[in-house]
Image (cartoon, rainbow, N blue to C red):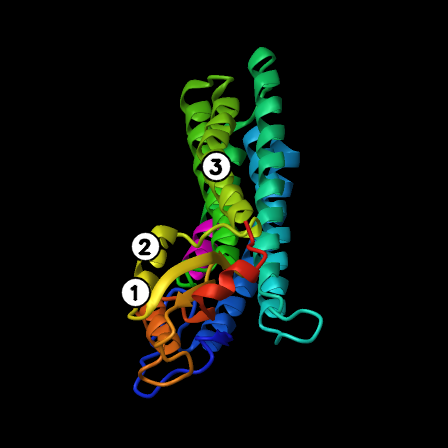
Amino acid sequence: MVLDAGARPGPGRDHGPGPGHGHGHGHSADTDRRRLAIALAVTLGTAVVGAVGAVLTGSLALLADLGHLLTDAAALAAAFVASVLAQRPADARRTFGLGRVEVLVAGVNAITLVAVVVWVAVEGVGRLIEPAEVPGLPLLVVGLLGLVGNLVSLAVLAGGDRRNMNMRGAMLHVLGDALGSVGVLAAALVLLFTGWPYADTVASLFIVALILPRTVALLREVGHVLLEGAPRGIDTADVRDALLAVPGVLDVHDLHLWSINDRRPTVSAHLVVDEATHVGCGEASVLDAAGAALRERFGLAHSTLQIEQDDHTDHEDHCR
């Protein structure tokens, strides 16, 4: 008997918001889309300023910042499209809907940012050998304008859904740009007061060192979700113990934990019960008791549980 414990709540069960389920999600998604649209407009304006400054000054730090801005604009546009697609309902071909689009876009954004960072690092090493002449005052003005734009975008995105990997990926890009602008300002001040020719290059390499670890961390998280890893913060052994603690459950096998995206954790399992156990629905059933335990302890609002007698397990092909 295969039953969806998340689809039929028993009487009096509380389906409060967990990590993958919450009230007002549609409103939150609409708000996130508006935030992404505003941040995209600000980023495009800042990119124009950065492009003009990079051409006028020949600054590597500004070029690094411009590269981040252009990838940011693409990342924000992709994140906006992904947030729209993720709200489309499931259908016969895509029974889970398009929630994974947000994860894919977050991964693409992280990969493009890694590519930009590597390019800046290679170019920076070259300029350490042969430093370029960069004027300090134009660099200071452009860096200041860029920082203002970055801070506006960060302020807009910071109020979004922190559980949303797509939003975190977009914020990471903008944060990289803000750090880039700080580096540009620092380089400009050093050039103005000391004339040290390596200031611009050192600032660009400092930006690389700050951004790369965060980008790699996001990429690892994306890979974990796409490879059907257990949701963050939920221990598989604890879930198994909670199911074994349900009265009437003798054994648990084929237990799988995964997530469609980072806000929709899901579980499936086979529960072996004794012959006297009520396997239907209702307050006395194993199904409702197990579903309630998963929701209340782990926030697993969607669970698919197969209830079976002990002698049935010998007739199954178990998923390893």
Q: Residue furthest right?
A: 93
Q: Earlier in the sequence, mark 1 or mark 2?
A: 2
Q: Which residues are magenta?
A: 149-157
Q: Are marks 1 and 2 in contact (CB under 8 Å)?
A: yes
Question: Within 10 Å of the Cα at label 2, are there few (<14), some (14-19), or many (20+) other Cα atoms?
Answer: few
Q: Earlier in the sequence, mark 1 or mark 3?
A: 3
- Is 267 or 121 nearer to us in this picture? 267
Q: Report whether 30 appears left or right of 238.
A: right
Q: Nearer the viewer, mark 1 or mark 3?
A: 1
Q: Position of residue 27 (x, y in %)?
A: 46, 77
What's the residue type where badge 3 is placed? Ile
- Is 34 or 185 nearer to us in this picture? 34
Q: CA distance from mark 1 to mark 2?
A: 10 Å
- Is 243 or 182 nearer to us in this picture? 243
What's the residue type where badge 2 is placed? Asp
Q: Nearer the viewer, mark 1 or mark 2?
A: 2
Image mark for residue 238? 2
Q: Position of residue 289 (x, y in %)?
A: 33, 75
- Disc 3 designates what residue? 211
